[in-house]
Image (tube, helix red, strand yellow):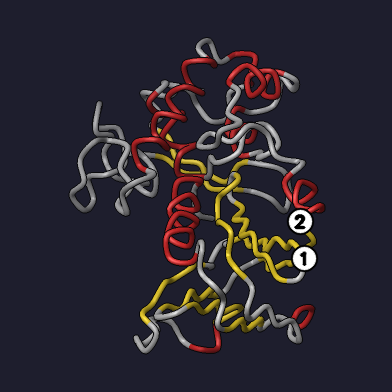
Amino acid sequence: MPEGDTVYRAAARLDGALSGQRLTLTDFRVPAFATVDLSGGTVVRSFSRGKHILTRIEHEQAWTLHTHLKMEGSWHVYRERERWRRPDVQVRIVLGVAGRRAVGFQLGVVELVPRQAEAELVAHLGPDLLGPDWDEERALANLRAQPQRPIGQALLDQRNLAGIGNMYMAELCFIMGVHPATAVADVAQLARLVRRGKQMLEVNKERAVQSTTGNLRERERMWVYRRDRSPCRRCGTPIAVTMLGEAGRERAAYWCPSCQPV
């Protein structure tokens, strides 16, 4: 699932292409909204909230388009006659303005709600690491509310703080020398861990190539994520991977057995 910085960039790309523009076409390719036509409406803005993208549109009344990339989704912006880079069968929505098309492929969520219902879409989320609502103390309080929960699971729970996915969870735990199965209560520098998480997303939000090592070269960008069986960059121990989490919701966790002892 995309990380919060990936979603931030997608929303910024939509905002730059559409905001302030009049819609020349809307093509919803999901059954619930297949007959909706917002042509003639004006796009007010697009922004991210955790891993959610909200696009405000004025058309007879105020609307909010809610999309979520889930595992496979993406938003592309094309010139009007430019060839799309993904197949037509994957398209879920097309928003057109003069000279440009914003195309949402394989979006996990497509919803259109009246503006007054917008807050309900993201009311369950904790403070957004990249949002104006960021509140470190509230995020820490949310994490500490379940002291025996494994830190890896707690960081991935968007109700605690919004924006961290599997990659940043693994990298944060490594940098802090914490095994992802460690209970929240046993993480000695929890506040520092959360601050490093925000720092990582802030650094990466403006660039397409994510890196936590500071090295942008292929195969050098991550400390442990998807590096199972490769030597640890610090000590040479082979990186380990296992599935952690509640039954049916397990996620791959990567760590160095030497640098992050259980």
- Residue 151 location (% of width, % of height): 60, 27
* Front position among marks 1 and 2: 1
Q: Are marks 1 and 2 in contact (CB under 8 Å)?
A: yes
Q: What residue is drawn where x is 63% and y is 24%?
A: 139
Q: Is residue 71 above or below residue 239?
A: below
- Which residue is denoted by mark 2 in the rendering? 115
Compare residues 33 and 209 and report the one nearer the observer: 33
Q: Is residue 90 left or right of residue 114?
A: left
**Does dot 1 land on a helix, a strand or a loop?**
strand
* Mark 1 surroundings within 10 Å by alpha-carbon count, few (fewer than 14), some (14 through 19), many (20 or more): few
- Answer with left or right where residue 254 lies relative to residue 229: right
The CA distance from mark 1 to mark 2 is: 8 Å
Task: Say which amino acid is labelled 2.
Answer: Arg
Q: Secondary structure at mark 2?
A: helix
Relative depth, front residue between 20 and 151:
20
Residues 260 and 146: in front is: 146
Mark 1 = which residue? 61
